[in-house]
Amino acid sequence: MGAKGSPAVRVFLDHPNGVDHELCEHATLQLTDLLRDYAVEVSSPGPSRPLTKVDHYRRFLGSRVRVRTRDAIEGRSNFNGELVDVDERRVALAGEWGTVEIPHERIKRSNLVPKHAPSRRSR
């Protein structure tokens, strides 16, 4: 459902090589038959994409990520660091505080940190 009850179709695209405007346009053209009856929105997860599956973490090993936990681990519940390892049980992040392993079931939310994003200290 879209705004005010109007029907809408939302399509989120993802691709190992990234999603650009051209790919979104191509997908939209494939959905033109829907435009008569629905508002169509095509987008990508974006540079701050959420990480919700083990495969997401594997794909972005070596990237900077932010992980918020349901409860504190080593006195913290907010970690911003490099994703250095992942398996079916947990993710491992490295930062100025060292390396921490976070079990998947304790992760409340996590996402990529865009490469161009300023750090909190430089704001």
Image (cartoon, rainbow, N blue to C red):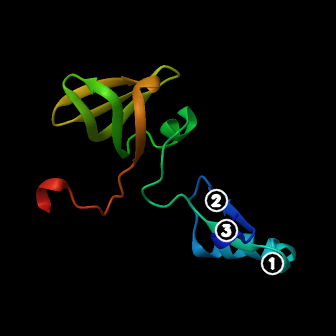
Which x, y percent locates residue 11?
69, 62
- Cα separation between marks 2 and 1: 17 Å
Q: Which residue is mark 1?
A: 35
- Quadrant of the rendered structure where residue 47 is? bottom left
Q: Secondary structure at mark 1?
A: helix
Q: Amino acid at mark 1?
A: Leu
User: Which class describes the residues within 10 Å of circle 2: few (<14), some (14-19), or many (20+)?
Assistant: few
Marks 3 and 2: which is nearer the front? 3
Depth check, front residue: 78 or 26: 78
Q: Amino acid at mark 3?
A: Gly
Marks 3 and 1: which is nearer the front? 3
Q: Earlier in the sequence, mark 2 or mark 1?
A: 2
Marks 2 and 1: which is nearer the front? 1
Compared to residue 102, the image places residue 94 above or below, namely below
Q: Which residue is mark 3?
A: 2
Circles 3 and 2, Cβ within 8 Å, touching? The answer is: no
Q: Is residue 37 left or right of residue 67?
A: right
Residue found at x 16% / y 37%: 96
- Quadrant of the rendered structure where residue 24 is? bottom right
- Cα separation between marks 3 and 2: 15 Å
How many numbered markers are drawn?
3
Q: Earlier in the sequence, mark 3 or mark 1?
A: 3
Q: Is residue 44 left or right of residue 74?
A: right
Q: Is residue 100 left or right of residue 43?
A: left
- Cα separation between marks 3 and 1: 13 Å
Q: Amino acid at mark 2?
A: Phe
Q: Which residue is mark 2?
A: 12
